[in-house]
Image (cartoon, rainbow, N blue to C red):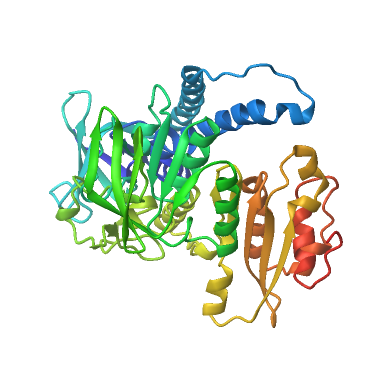
Amino acid sequence: MAQNYDVVILGGGTGGYVAAIRSAQLGLKTAIVEKGELGGTCLHRGCIPSKALLRSAEVYSTTKHHAADFGVETGEVSLDFARVQQRKQGIVDQLHAGVQGLMKKGKIDVYEGIGRILGPSIFSPNAGTISVEMKNGEENEMLIPSNVIIATGSRPRTLPGLTIDGEFVMSSDEALKMESLPKSILIVGGGVIGIEWASMLNDFGVDVTVIEYAERIIPTEDKDISKEMLKLLKKKGIKFATSAKVMADTLETGENGVTIQAEINGKNESFSAEKMLVSVGRQANVENIGIENTDIIIENGFIQVKKTFQTKESHIYAIGDVIGGLQLAHVASHEGITAIEHIKGNNPHAINYDLVSRCIYSNPEAASVGITEDQAKEKGHDVKVGKFSFKAIGKALVYGESDGFVKIIADKETNDILGVHMIGPHVTDMISEAGLAMVLDATPWEIADTIHPHPTLSEVMGEAALAVDGKAIHS
């Protein structure tokens, strides 16, 4: 028998389940259709498991290489990678159970299977129906929604010719399941995910080489951040090749591992390692969900939406990675909330993507909000820049992590903050101050006038804000 719902959400990842919770809070009868596990990529194959591994790598590296700096004698330090993976899975399982509990609390129906949008029917002549192919083998379910939200997420992309075999050539999905660490690895792609994996595996003791097509790593970030990240990761022993075009047809795999060539400045160079990780972005999951039965527009692989996240079919919304843009879990969550608020008729504010904080959880960490210095100049701003190093921050010296800096970009005429860029210890936990400042349209002097407690890492924000006008105290 067909079930009626106010909202049916295809996909139970971060964006989908957050949308479902807000929907239930607003009194809408809600269902989620999820073919895998609630929590989606972020919880099971992305944000959480990768950060759990990064933390283990950080602890291992710090203990092995820097414990003596703190007067702690440890003796021989060894790594139990099976325990590392066990800890990671324990965190994932705990959070997964929490999401399941939230669904029960909100009385949200969860259908485990593949949901497909069908055309209008006698049951729903306007909105259409959702067919659910149940993964447990039970008879298919038919759902009749007033509104649909597509939140099916994304999957790792690869390059033509670089087939993911899971043994020699991996995406991040396969890498997260490794039972043992390779001695060496080639990472194709020096973007955010590639740099996080490079940092993690290096801290675990793996010989890492990063091959990046662009002229610099993390090319979407401010040039000063890219330059500092490259310097600090090279200092740790990671090797880099930039402006490198990987030649997929030269890939060879076998007993000796992986060999591939890349064209760099007109010359071919050969690279070899035990494994290869391909990290060249993600592609939207838009197949096999019935989009062909709708008027929804797809461009460059992504669903096109309005600021309200409505597709061309006004009762069908799309959020998260399937619409492109900033493919971040926290963005998907807010997009889901905005879509639900619009469905309810609450006239929500449009999301300003320039005010979204972005984080890189490598060692060192990096974080940013707003636009880069180059982007500011391209937009016609006459900029002033304040930059302050962690080396003058007492708490950073106490931590033993004083590399990096905070950079604030402001408009000379209006004094508006245009962007804040950080690299150094715990900056992913500090970026929200900058994000809030930009949301509230604060100026550098207002940040500087905020008394930052001493000794804390956050003092670097106050000093960088003073530096915008040449007034930093400790430089």
- Quarter location, residue 277: top left
Task: Pick the residue in front: 100 or 370.
Answer: 370
x, y percent for residue 222: 56, 63
x, y percent for residue 400: 74, 39
Task: Pick the residue in front: 197 or 285.
Answer: 197
User: From the viewer's perspective, is 63 left or right of 260?
Assistant: right
Residue 127 seen: yes
Q: Is residue 70 above or below residue 189?
A: above
Residue drawn 69% across and 58% down? 406
Residue drawn 74% across and 56% down? 389
Q: Which residue is most to the left? A: 122
- Quarter location, residue 288: top left
x, y percent for residue 295: 19, 61
- Quarter location, residue 405: bottom right
User: From the viewer's perspective, is 447 left or right of 116?
Assistant: right
Residue drawn 65% across and 45% down? 429
x, y percent for residue 225: 59, 58
Q: Is residue 415 above or below residue 63?
A: below
Quarter holding the N terminus?
top left
Task: Pick the residue in front: 292 or 463.
Answer: 463
Residue drawn 26% across and 62% down? 300
Residue 23 seen: no
Q: How many marks?
A: 0
Q: Is residue 71 above or below residue 361?
A: above
Quarter holding the C terminus?
bottom right
